[in-house]
Image (spheres, helix red, strand yellow):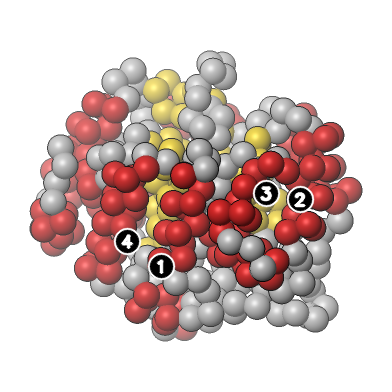
Amino acid sequence: MNITRSQALDLFASPDLLGTGMEADALRRRFHPEGVVTYIIDRNINYTNFCTEYCSFCAFYRPMGHKEGYIQPIEVTLDKIQETLELGGTGVLMQGGLHPDLKIEWYEEMLRAIKSRFPQIWLHCFSAPEITNIAEVSGLTLADTIARLRDAGLDSIPGGGAEILDDEVRHRIARLKCRSQEWVDVHLAAHRLGMRTTATMMFGCGETIEQRMNHLEIIRNIQEETGGFTAFIPWSFQRENTSLGRFVKEEATAVEYLKTLAISRLYLDNIVNIQSSWVTQGLKTCQVGLRFGGNDVGSIMIEENVVSAAGARNHASEEDLRRMIRDAGFRPHQRDTLYRTYFLN
């Protein structure tokens, strides 16, 4: 379909929400004609909440030395992974704050310990800001950092830390965090090393539609060059417990979410999978999103601490997600991190 930036901007301005949704649904059917919507059973594990970036949209981090800060012992991480496997999980998404004292050897030791105990678990870990931080404190290039993490057991990289890939926005909401180009550089380096990654967007944090389109254009251009993204995952900023929430008075509505989801599907026509989010929008809006371009509903999230710290309170079991998918007229299939649906239960 390959709509232009100008056409995408027109769709953002258009009051025809249902028409935009129908176009996105038609493109979703071209990519996924079999009538299947996927989900994954995995767990978010946070290895530390110490962080030096102080992002205004984050309620999870603690500054260095804070009494509520922690570095999670490897034994606790291993116990969480054991429980994940017992619940039918196939992977973990590991993320943490940007710690100034943890060099790459610490991460390598953790990854090797996990793979030694659980060789079957898929490790989808470390956002671009985390990898940039590891490289900086270890005195390594991005490529060497990613290669060493891969060799220690890292399987793929999540798209976190993107927020809005526009440096004016980033300076306003996370001025100490990596710049847009640094996020891009991490994903390009990973793709060139043969590693798959996901792309994300946190919108509704006071950005303009033009800035939102800057983000989508960067994602489309990377995918055009490398083909390394498995999926695109947009979600809305949760303001309740954040300092940024004092300035962004209203969260994105369900209408704004569905329009952004649909336009993402149409504009990112070189990415196969688009995820509809229940974590920030709730099950009902997520379900509607399956007719606005989404073909995946993400994870049951056995554990999630970052978005929930900002005020998101939605919860879902595997059966909740399967019922939601069936009621929307699709067949639910469990998938793995690379969107392979060999779990046809």
Residue in front for this viewpoint, 48 or 306: 48
For label 4, the residue is: 215
Q: From mark 3 to mark 1, how far is it between C-alphas?
A: 23 Å
Q: Earlier in the sequence, mark 4 or mark 2?
A: 2
Q: Earlier in the sequence, mark 1 or mark 2?
A: 2
Q: Amino acid at mark 3?
A: Arg
The answer to whether residue 262 shows anywhere in this view is no
Q: From mark 4 to mark 2, how far is it between C-alphas?
A: 32 Å
> Where's the N terminus, which quadrant?
top left
Disc tally is 4
- The residue depicted at 72 percent of the width and 28 percent of the height is 120
Q: Earlier in the sequence, mark 3 or mark 2?
A: 2
Q: Amino acid at mark 4?
A: His
For label 2, the residue is: 108
In the image, residue 331 sits, relative to residue 298, either above or below, namely above
Q: Are marks 3 and 2 in contact (CB under 8 Å)?
A: yes
Q: Are marks 1 and 4 in contact (CB under 8 Å)?
A: no
